[in-house]
Image (spheres, rainbow, N blue to C red):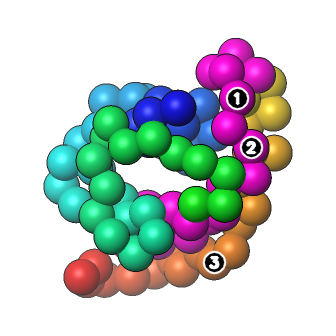
Amino acid sequence: MRLDLYLKAACLVKRRAVARALCDAGQVLVGGARARASRTVRVGDRVEVRFPGRRVLVEVVAVAETERLRAGGRGSYRLLREEVGLTALG
């Protein structure tokens, strides 16, 4: 599954366009490296999403069809770390 579609289906972002914009801006890392929206997500990948004032690091535990992820979006990843209240993201 594409990274932008996964972020939307897992409910990490509200819209796929937002996921693509974050990827284009270099604010999504997979395995510590910047990732394009078209990158394929696999079970075991560690995905870091940098929002303004917040960072989220998750481990992918399930990748399935979009409809199945929407039913249980939070079950498709394990939250590893969340940092809130960041002023400058690097």
Residue displayed at 38% across by 65% down: 29
The dot on residue 81 is 3
- Furthest-left residue in this view: 25
The answer to whether residue 8 of the structure is visible from this angle is: no
Q: Badge 2: how crowded within 10 Å, few (<14), some, or many (20+)?
A: some
- Residue under circle 2? 62
Residue displayed at 24% across by 42% down: 21
The quadrant holding residue 72 is: top right
Query: Identity of the amino acid at label 1?
Result: Ala
Is-magenta flag for residue 32?
no
Distance from disc 3 to disc 2, alpha carbons, whole Å, reads: 18 Å
Residue displayed at 62% across by 64% down: 58
Horizontal and vertical percent for residue 90?
24, 82
Horizontal and vertical percent for residue 30?
43, 63
- Establish if 55 lies above or below 9: below
- Residue under circle 1? 64
Q: Which one is nearer the viewer's eye here, 71 or 51? A: 71
Of pointers 3 and 2, the one earlier in the residue sequence = 2
